[in-house]
Amino acid sequence: MDNILFAFLLTLGAGLCTGIGSFIAFFSKRTNIKFLSLTLGFSAGVMIYISFIEIFPKAQEALISAAGEKNGTFFTVVSFFVGMLLIALIDKLIPNYENPHEMKNIEDISEKTLKKNRSLHRMGIFSALAIGIHNFPEGLATFISAIDNPTLGISIAIAIALHNIPEGIAVSVPIYFSTGSKKKALLYSLLSGLSEPLGAIIGYLILLPFMNNLIFGIIFAGVAGIMVFISLDELLPAAEKYGEHHLSIYGLISGMIVMAISLLIF
């Protein structure tokens, strides 16, 4: 029960980091592209390293013990790519304009823009919905990982928290400029992040009672696929979009190094 509570609190904390994006949007006149490039790259590095070095092998080990070496390896590979397919389908169903991958700069929208564009409020609502849908499997990933290995769960939670910051900006900016209300902007931003603990709760209620090596291995391999896809499709392209190529790569390598050291120590 201690592990479950800890895993849930980790997932909740990571989800609520969309609120940090709101505060950045409120108090910054320009987007700090260096900070975002570095943190998005760092987040991608953590996710990719964890997925291939820690999560995929653990999933394979569990599935081999449940189904034998040949079948277990086959199930691991299939589950990995099914995880990728799942998040790709979610991504495909979200229109580009409201897609959380389409990062918004604070300076992209101004009071002048507000007068010309009356659809900002709708854009903010759809951004919140899109990010909420997108964050659901991330919440499940953090929760399941933290139950199995709290250190691993912390690493995933940090990576997800970092990339939730620009997602919070994407929701807050249009809501704030369309309504003039910081409270509404913060509320929508936080609600979009709350889908992560919702993913954890559903994982606990539906999956945990039936958890065995087979189910655990399939979920874990799928989680690895989801995280790799998010890193390659969302985090690195977003870091590149901010125009700081080298910083995003430095962040990527730093994330891998920090993750490697933490796994060696703990």
Image (spheres, rainbow, N blue to C red):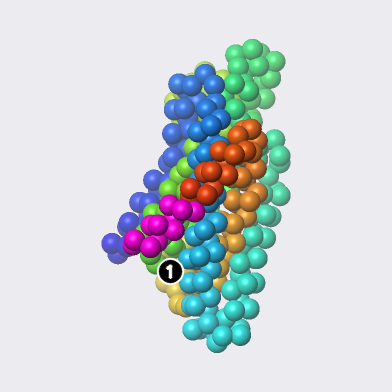
**In the rendered image, which residue does mark 1 sit on?**
208
Observer-nearest residue: 83 or 242?
A: 242
Q: Position of residue 172 (x, y in %)?
A: 53, 29
**Is 209 within the magenta?**
no
Observer-nearest residue: 251 or 180?
A: 251
| SS type, badge 1 | helix
> Which residue does the image show at 64% across and 12% down from the upper left?
112
Observer-nearest residue: 163 or 213?
A: 163
**Looking at the image, can residue 129 be seen?**
no
**Looking at the image, can residue 257 be seen?**
yes
Residue farthest along the left direction in this orientation: 2
Q: Which residues are magenta?
A: 256-266
**Is 262 within the magenta?**
yes
Observer-nearest residue: 26 or 129?
A: 26
Q: Position of residue 258 (x, y in %)?
A: 43, 52
> Which residue does the image show at 44% across and 40% down from the upper left?
17
